[in-house]
Amino acid sequence: MEIDEEKIDEAVLALLYLTLHDGGRAWKSFDWDAMNRLHEKGLIENPVGKAKSVLFTEGGLKESERLFQKLFTKGS
């Protein structure tokens, strides 16, 4: 089975929106490879560190909300 990392990244980014707090932070309890890819794409700040949450970039927050609505809400 071949895994589509792009779909994984979209789902992780959308789920990060679910844990949004303090105006732009999200709990970083997801796969480290996916978190690193999101950082490389400029969607979140560097996830490496002692903090239990990660800061969205401005574009990352908007994309996270868009994907959350696309993947996890019922009809518009």
Image: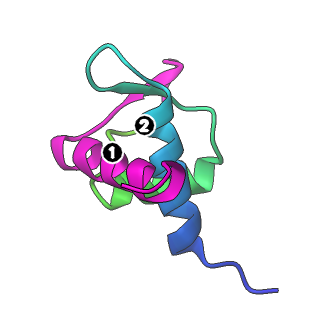
User: Do labels 1 and 2 touch, CB within 8 Å?
Assistant: yes
Q: Is residue 70 magenta?
A: yes
Which residue extends farthest front?
75
Residue 48 visible at all: no
Whether residue 4 is situated above or below residue 56 in the rendered picture: below
Residue at point 70% right, 78% down? 3
Q: Quadrant of the C terminus?
A: bottom left
Which residue in the rendered view is the most extreme toward the bottom?
A: 1
Above/below status of 49 relative to 16: above
Check disc 1 and report its element: helix, strand or loop. helix
- On the rendered image, what quadrant is the N terminus found in? bottom right
- Please identify the quarter of the rendering in which residue 11 is found: bottom right
Q: Name the amino acid, label 2.
A: Tyr
* Image: magenta residue range: 49-76
Color scheme of the displayed model: rainbow
Residue at left 42%, top 58%? 70
Inspect this view and state whether residue 58 appears. yes
Q: Is residue 26 magenta?
A: no
Residue 74 % position (x, y): 50, 51
Q: Dot 2 lies on which element?
A: helix
Q: Residue 41: x and y, percent? A: 32, 61
Give the mark nearer the N terminus: 1 vs 2.
2
Q: Position of residue 21 (x, y in %)?
A: 38, 17
Residue type, mark 1 in image: Glu
Numbered label attached to residue 17: 2
